[in-house]
Image (tube, rainbow, N blue to C red):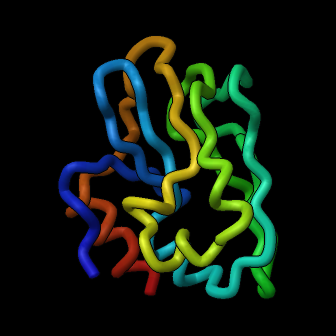
Amino acid sequence: MSSPNDLKYTESHEWIKVDGDTVTVGITAHAAESLSDLVYLDLPSVGDGVNVGEGFGEIESVKAVSDLKSPVKGEVVEVHDGLEDDLTTINTDPYGGGWMIKVKLAGDLPSGLLDAAAYDKLVAEAS
């Protein structure tokens, strides 16, 4: 499955969708597939600050616990609370209903974000 072209990606397998000065954040289909059976999700609260490359939560599967790293700097303005009750949405719809947080940007987007082609290449080379 190729990654959606309207998103930006990180090397740690998060995606962002930019809408003005608000960014929606989730994990990629590749990350969700790698984790497989999800059992726990810990997300920040509205009003929490996030910084580029720093953890904003944790996701746990039967295989491993992974830190969720923020692709941007800003303030959490919305949290997808329903995910904690239905973690399968992250696997079945990672780029839609599986979004995790929305962040009001503080400053510009970081320069290291990947487009879909570069992210797909990164995933292919790691396989």
The location of residue 73, given as percent across then percent down, is 56, 24
Which residue: 75% across, 33% down? 45
Which residue: 61% across, 21% down? 75
Which residue: 65% across, 71% down? 87
**Residue 119 occupies quadrant:** bottom left
Q: Is residue 103 above or below residue 26?
A: above
Q: Is residue 21 above or below residue 122?
A: above
Question: Closest to the observer: 75 or 11?
Answer: 75
**Residue 49 occupies quadrant:** top right
Question: Closest to the observer: 88 or 12?
Answer: 88
Q: Locate residue 22 relative to residue 100 in the image: left or right.
A: left
The location of residue 38, given as percent across then percent down, is 71, 78
- Residue 26 visible in rendering: yes
The location of residue 67, given as percent across then percent down, is 74, 56
- Residue 66 visible in rendering: no
Q: Is residue 31 above or below residue 98?
A: below
Which residue: 49% across, 21% down? 104
Q: Locate residue 91 relative to residue 6 in the image: left or right.
A: right
Q: Quadrant of the N terminus?
A: bottom left
Q: Locate residue 49 relative to residue 30 in the image: left or right.
A: right
Residue lying at the far top of the rendered structure = 107
Q: In the rendered picture of this protein, how many numbered marks are placed on residues?
A: 0
The location of residue 96, given as percent across then percent down, is 38, 60
**Residue 12 occupies quadrant:** bottom right
Q: Quadrant of the C terminus?
A: bottom left
